[in-house]
Amino acid sequence: MTIVYLTESAEQPVRDIIRRFGMAESAVPPEQGSYLQADSDGISLCRVGEKGRVRVDFVGGAAQYRRTKGGGELIAKAVNHTTQPTVWDGTGGLGRDAFVLASLGLEIKVIEQNPAVACLLSDGLRRAAESGGEIAAIAARIHLYFGDTGMLLPQLSAEHGRPDVVYLDPMYPERQKSAAVKKEMAYFHDLIDTPQNEAGLLAAARKTAKKRIVVKRPRLGQFLNGEAPAYQYTGKSTRFDVYLPEPEALPTSIKA
């Protein structure tokens, strides 16, 4: 289990997030591997022996750029955002794509099944909400759920009705050119060491979505679970594969 190095400067809202996801707390950092650090800046993903940190930041940097340019992004076309669909993100991660979609005015339900990643995302949403203004309004449209995606999709469907779109971005062992991305992916592979059930993930999504399932892939990456999509939106480095929902069962005719 990933531990949280809980420093004395960590404020109560941060401590509440750690306990919400049942993380193991420690007064000292571990001797090896990746861990979470909770301090006055929030929650960060660190690795022993390295200076870099990974933190969810929706207020500045890349998130700021993607927010202002989000309307023209390929992901917006892939989910057909002009129709204002309901979108459920089944592989929340750091919430970057969810934030882009929420910046377009969409309400997003995000599912994350790894407790450490859920901590990072929850903390990022907390800080975005505290920033006020437009950023806080966008963050308010993102609703985080913690648990197994295959189990939560039918549960949420029963409670809220089926969404128009289920969005998936499973971790992919892609070769990256950017040193920063390499470091971030290395940290995450330490956290998420269990292969995702691609068949189960895609099957659950096809039973849940009303209109389409959108899967993010590297431009030259393999299809999810080896299944060819109905159509694609392809960019320079990324593509979005679109699958159609599972046909609804037709009622059996009754003979008189």
Image (cartoon, grey):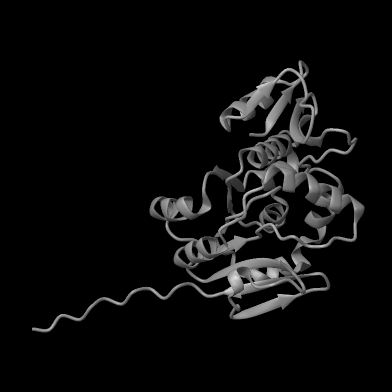
The answer to which quarter of the image holds residue 80 is bottom right
Residue 192 percent coordinates (x, y): 67, 46
**Which is nearer the eye, 97 or 117?**
117
Q: Position of residue 194 (x, y in %)?
A: 62, 50
Left or right: 248, with 118 as reference point:
left
Q: Is residue 108 above or below residue 242?
A: above
As drawn, the residue found furthest toward the left would be 256
Camera-side residue: 143 or 216?
216
Horizontal side, residue 213 vs residue 94: left or right: left
Placement of the N terminus among the 4 image quadrants: top right
Quarter of the image containing the C terminus? bottom left
Q: Residue at x 44, y 66 (%)?
A: 207
For residue 39, side relative to residue 229 (left or right): right
Q: Which residue in the rendered view is the most extreme toward the bottom?
A: 255
- The vertical placement of 8 against 81, above or below, is above
Residue at point 75%, 64% (across, down)? 71
The relative height of residue 14 versus residue 71 in the rendered view (above or below) is above
Which residue appears farthest toward the top when viewing the image? 8
Please name the residue shown 77% across and 74% down the image: 220
Q: Position of residue 174 (x, y in %)?
A: 78, 62
Query: In the rendered image of this protein, does residue 166 appear above or below residue 25?
Result: below
